[in-house]
Amino acid sequence: MAINMYATRVLLQTLQYIKKPCSYLLDTFTQKQKPTRGKYIDIDIVRGGQKMAAFVSPVTKGEHVKKDAFKTLSFQPGYTKEFMLFQAGDGDDDRTAGQTIYAGNDNAQSFEEQQLKDGLSKLLNRILVREEWMASQALLYGKYSMKGDNFPEVIVDFDPKSAHFITLATGNKWNANLTVGSVSSPIQFLRAHCNLIFKSGRKVVRITMDPKAAQLFLDHPDTKDYFSNQKNYNYGFVEPKPIGDDNAYFLCKLLDPAVEIYVYSGSYEDKDGNAVNFLPDYTVLFGNPNSRFERRYASIYDKKCMYPVDYFAKTYEEDNPSGVYLLVQSAPVLAFVEPDSFGRAFVA
């Protein structure tokens, strides 16, 4: 029995095997959850750090421990719903990237299959870029917005502790190290901010900087002094190396605070064609990959979508203009379940 490459079940299986782009923020800090059945997403935001059991006399009633406090956000996410049109004759003049010019397309079916695969990959990657943007906004500001055609703006605000999301004062900025009256000290700041976050969330184990913040960090006299003692005291080491993502790399490891530092330079193209970095200049992010920061998906309301999925693809034909439409849909939500376990600083 021949396989119909335009069948919905085939498209859904193909989506699972398409090579996805590296998405440092999504891959590092988020955990993918099963899609939800329903158009609404409920997010329980958990507050509070670790607490210690109290000592009491064996003849007392004991200590009453209250349930952990949390609040629930409930909203309907926006859809990503984009399509591509494949028309008769596409293979006559078109060629795929890298194909020799004027080589022609001797195998029409092979070209059609490749065209469909490329279309799926392109539409899926656009959704992943949107999810990476949502993750960046949540990590930078503790909130993000969703708005679009016939979809009123929805602001998803996780209300993190404001003390975790700061801009350094003038004298504390990392590029103020040669200024009279400067008290700038990157190492002391990283140590203090990690301790602050740990008091109400999880222990910070990973710090992520944009390239400009990383350069200020490495060039700062305070940092050079810190690493100059590493041979005698093993305070840490600087050893840049790739991590499998072209837009990110491991920079160094510190002993106090006990964190690894990474550099991320990922970007996306805005509607005007301009490249925009996911992390603004001079950004430092604090987090723990084990903190609950989840990727969730609401139901796709389509007659062909019979069960909850994260990404749904289908094809359909129209006579005017004549062609086959490839449609990929998703209703993604980034759920900051433990927002107080993260932090951000603009350091210059």
Image (cartoon, grey):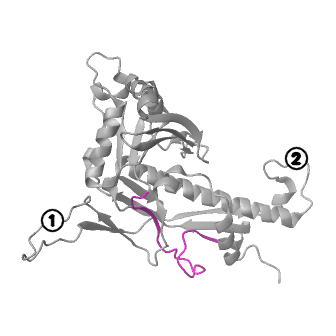
Magenta highlight range: 290-313
Q: Which mark is residue 111?
A: none
Picture quadrant where residue 116 is located: bottom right
Q: Amino acid at mark 2?
A: Thr
- Disc 1: which residue: 54
Q: Which quadrant of the rendered structure holds the N terminus?
A: bottom right
Q: Residue at x 81, y 47 (%)?
A: 98
Q: Which quadrant of the rendered structure holds the C terminus?
A: top left
Residue 68 in the image: x percent, y percent? 24, 68
Of 44 and 221, the residue lying toward us = 221
Can I make out residue 173 in this image? yes
Residue 218 in the image: x percent, y percent? 46, 28
Residue 228 in the image: x percent, y percent? 44, 25
Image height of 43 relative to 260, above or below: below
Per the image, label 2 sits on a secondary structure element best described as: loop
Image height of 306 relative to 18, above or below: below
Q: Residues within 10 Å of mark 2 (few under 14, many from 20)?
A: few
- Disc 2: which residue: 100
Per the image, label 1 sits on a secondary structure element best described as: loop
Residue 76 in the image: x percent, y percent? 40, 69
Of 18 and 112, the residue lying toward us = 18
Name the mark nearer the viewer: 2 or 1: 1
Q: Residues within 10 Å of mark 1 (few under 14, many from 20)?
A: few
Can I make out residue 164 in this image? no
